[in-house]
Image: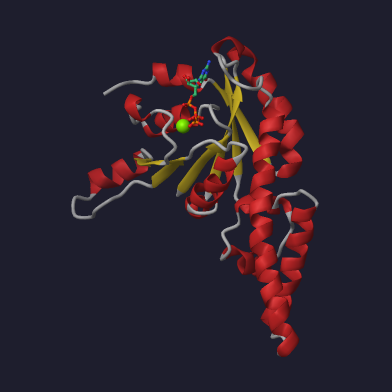
């Protein structure tokens, strides 16, 4: 299982990454615009038990691979972010953790506004998918003009048109109702707005007692987009995690 951690700059993505993977931050590398990758094993008492019972078989834990990405910035760097991380490496993720800043940060250009940040990132996912879908749609349309389409191509054309309309309306593919065959037709494109999203609302330590309330509010706002929300304070959790 592959999880891509995405979000606006300085939202706490790298802190969440270290928290989830149990890796130590490399202070010299902080804020370098690069992606980090780490694999963790999911402890599973059932696997341990099987291991005790049989010495001959090799038992493996489920592994989860996390990918930490640079923040999305407006302007010139947006293009490289898109090409490098976004459409590139993130494609393989099975799910996305969208980290949003809920804490005040010295020197930040904007005050925290989780719904704004979620919408911004979602719009990027949608925009990125629209480019892919339009390209394929155009190509297929040209093809069926010279040669009558197979049943498979007719179905694909229909799915592409529905996906296109969904994205143009600003809605993620996650919530487009598709049959099993239709889903399969889109799978190869590894579309970003189709991936499940868990919003990680990253709060200041002082707001933690209200984490539930904040998270419930966001859940209500984004349930229609098929997103789930959790509230935490990555900085505190990271400080408190067991070492060694
Ligand atoms: N108060 C508070 N600060 C946090 C929290 N999580 C992260 N920070 C701080 O926010 C800043 C950014 O954290 P990072 O984890 O580097 O954020 P990022 O999203 O990886 O940043 P970029 O990769 O530069 O986009 C650091 O100064 C963190 O100490 C939190 O839960 N509460
Ligand atoms: Mg980072």
Residue that appears at 40% across and 30% down: 18
Q: In the figure, 148 relative to 188: above or below?
A: below
Residue that appears at 58% across and 33% down: 8
Spot occupied by residue 178 in the image (x, y as percentages of width and height): 72, 62
User: Front-most of 184 and 8?
Assistant: 8
Spot occupied by residue 207 in the image (x, y as percentages of width and height): 61, 13
Residue that appears at 75% across and 85% down: 145
Quadrant placement of the C terminus: top left
Residue 211, located in which quarter of the rendered image?
top right
Residue that appears at 24% across and 53% down: 58
Spot occupied by residue 217 in the image (x, y as percentages of width and height): 73, 26
Asked whether residue 148 is in view, the answer is no
Q: In the figure, 44 relative to 218: above or below?
A: below
Q: Is residue 116 left or right of residue 34?
A: right
Q: Residue furthest top?
A: 206
User: Front-most of 85 and 38?
Assistant: 85
Residue 40, located in which quarter of the rendered image?
top left
Spot occupied by residue 131 in the image (x, y as percentages of width and height): 66, 59
């Amino acid at each position: 299982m592959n999880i891509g951690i995405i979000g606006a700059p300085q939202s706490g993505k790298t802190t969440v990454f270290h928290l989830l993977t149990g890796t130590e931050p490399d202070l010299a590398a902080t804020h370098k615009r690069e992606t980090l990758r780490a694999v963790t094993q999911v402890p599973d008492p059932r696997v341990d038990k099987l291991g005790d019972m049989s010495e001959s078989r090799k038992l493996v834990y489920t592994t989860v691979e996390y990918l930490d990405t640079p923040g999305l910035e407006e302007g010139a760097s947006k293009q490289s972010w898109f090409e490098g991380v976004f459409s590139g490496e993130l494609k393989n993720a099975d799910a996305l953790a969208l980290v949003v800043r809920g804490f005040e940060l010295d020197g930040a250009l904007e005050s925290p506004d989780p719904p704004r940040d979620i919408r911004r990132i979602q719009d990027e996912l949608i925009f990125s998918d629209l480019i892919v879908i339009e390209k394929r749609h155009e190509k297929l349309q040209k093809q069926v003009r010279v040669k009558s389409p197979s049943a498979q191509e007719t179905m694909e054309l229909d799915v592409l048109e529905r996906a296109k309309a969904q994205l143009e309306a600003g809605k993620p593919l996650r919530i487009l109702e598709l049959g099993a065959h239709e889903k399969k037709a889109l799978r190869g494109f590894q579309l970003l707005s189709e991936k499940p999203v868990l919003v990680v609302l990253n709060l200041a330590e002082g707001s933690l007692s209200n984490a539930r309330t904040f998270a419930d509010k966001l859940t209500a706002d984004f349930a229609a987009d098929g997103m789930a929300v959790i509230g935490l304070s990555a900085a505190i959790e990271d400080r408190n995690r067991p070492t060694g």
